[in-house]
Image: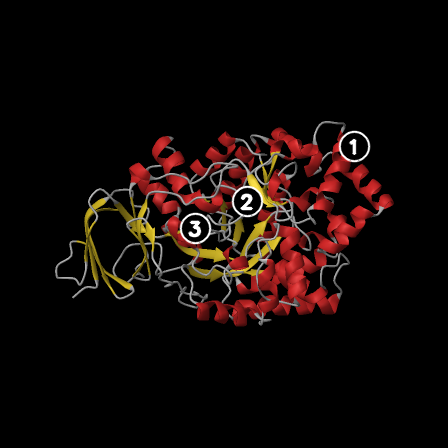
Amino acid sequence: MYDLLIRNATIYDGTENEEALHGAIAIAGDTIASVGHCDGTARRTLDADGLVACPAFIDIHSHADLNILAKPTAPNYLKMGVGTVVTGQCGISMAPLGTTEELFALSKNSTGGAVPEDARFRWTWRGFGEFCRLVEEIRTGVNILPMVGHGSARTAVSSFRKEPLGGEDIARLVNLLDDALREGAWGVSTGLFYPPGCFSSEAEMDAVFRLLGRRKALHATHMRDESDFVVECVAENIALARRWGFPLQISHHKASGRKNRGKVRTTMEMLRRARDEGLDVAWDAYPYHASSTGITICLPDRALEGGKEAMLARLRDPDTRTALRREMLENPHSIFPRESPPESIMIANCPALPRDQGRMLSDILGNGSPEERTERFFDWLLACGGDARAIFFAMDEEDVAYVISRPGTIIGSDSRIADPADDGAPHPRVFGTFPRFLRHFVLERNLLSLGEGIHRITGLPAKRLGLRDRGVLRPGARADIVLFDPSRLDGGPGFGEPPRFAEGIVHLFVNGVAAVEEGRLTSSRSGRVCLKTSTGT
């Protein structure tokens, strides 16, 4: 007898097969027993007439680990139909850990405070394996596939300093990363755009890349530049993959800044040629024309050395402040005010100044010369303690559509765990990435067939990771299954709107247990920490 029999579903199995199958899915325990024609009885039968059944979505680029301890149920992911998230991205992972204060500083400078402040004093682990065991013990709503962040390991070795690492420290850094890979990390992520990654020397990174090549470990990278030098950075990363022989994943690929519109056509051709050459190169993207990260990325890198308090001290010092303002105004590649003027920046979360959440930075700073507005920006940073997350409207919608339409593009949220009770007006991707992708780009714009669209968020990321028992509907695979109503899919809140869950996900099963039933979250926490092993599970 089966535990569950889903009948009358329109089934897409997650593979490259774009044709739907009309039939049933049988589940026994945490495993799919049969797909298509299913004989036998079940303890429970679910009529899925009018619904699409497919593998639960896999988010290849998530920051869910940053607040998984505070929000283990991961409700926004479940309501998006996500059963598995790949964490530890952009060089930031919750382990290895030097001190709690150092990792908290890394989170504040790189992600705008995604790590809850009230959670930092309860951190009891140091190593990667210890953290994974802790997450497994608390039981989570989604499956976690953890990567290890270069920035976190570097911070554990040298705090948040800018000075190049010496030979002994480089060896310690490489050992920490190697330990994490041996303990089951799915790869190493870098965030060379953020501190401390941007402080890294060529010798340091060569040692890291040598390790990745030797271990054939996945390298997921938030590149040094996604705007004026995006073409050069894609070329750099392709060359590194060719030189060292590691699999490359370019994270949230895009071209930021009005003057860089259209460059993705060049970069996507470069990536295609690299694949034709035989290189193991892939990329992901989110389905929005705006990005989101900590507001402090608007400052020069040197302003961020040492963490948040050191940054605020620099803004209080008149001479340093003057030098920083001059650098921001004179640098033709500065984020603020050149690539992203105040009119293109929305404040998403700002605990110290909640009145500013959902407002454009231009409204906060008011009119005036660039010098005056930059001075007011410094004052505002001091007023909010440098603790704010912003949304940057810096991309072109048609560039986003072009990247999504290209063969091989995987969809990721670049998001964290949240629920509608949270403060602020977060980026819509937090609540709507996967329903929006299917609704807007697949069903409305017809950039992809529904079968291909589903493949991009199920079987394709699973294949990229070497994950053999998730991302597809077939006998023997884990019973991670989502049923959605295509006519009801929406992408959750719009920009600047109050948080809310997306609609259209009717049922979701994670390891055979109902996580969403009739559109409502259950109390189950059936996710698992899935470590990289020789079998890929």
**SS class, disc 2:** loop
Q: Amino acid at mark 1?
A: Glu
Dots 2, 3 in contact, CB < 8 A: no
**SS class, disc 3:** helix
| Residue name at image x 73 percent, y 48 percent | 301
Q: Which residue is mark 3?
A: 76
Between disc 1 and disc 2, the foreground one is 2
Q: Quadrant of the N terminus?
A: bottom left
The vertical placement of 366 against 482, above or below, is above
CA gap between label 1 and label 2 equals: 29 Å
Whether residue 365 is visible to the viewer of this picture, yes or no, is yes
In the image: residue 272, left or right of residue 206: left
| Residue name at image x 43 percent, y 68 percent | 534
**Which of the two discs, 2 and 3, labels the residue nearer the N terminus?**
3
- Residue 174 location (% of width, % of height): 64, 66
Circle 2: is it few (<14), some (14-19), or many (20+) Cα within 10 Å?
many
Circle 3: is it few (<14), some (14-19), or many (20+) Cα within 10 Å?
many
Q: Amino acid at mark 3?
A: Asn
CA gap between label 2 and label 3 equals: 15 Å
Q: Which residue is mark 1?
A: 371
In the image: residue 489, left or right of residue 236: left
Q: Quadrant of the C terminus?
A: bottom left
Q: Which residue is mark 2?
A: 424
Q: Nearer the viewer, residue 117 or 490?
A: 117
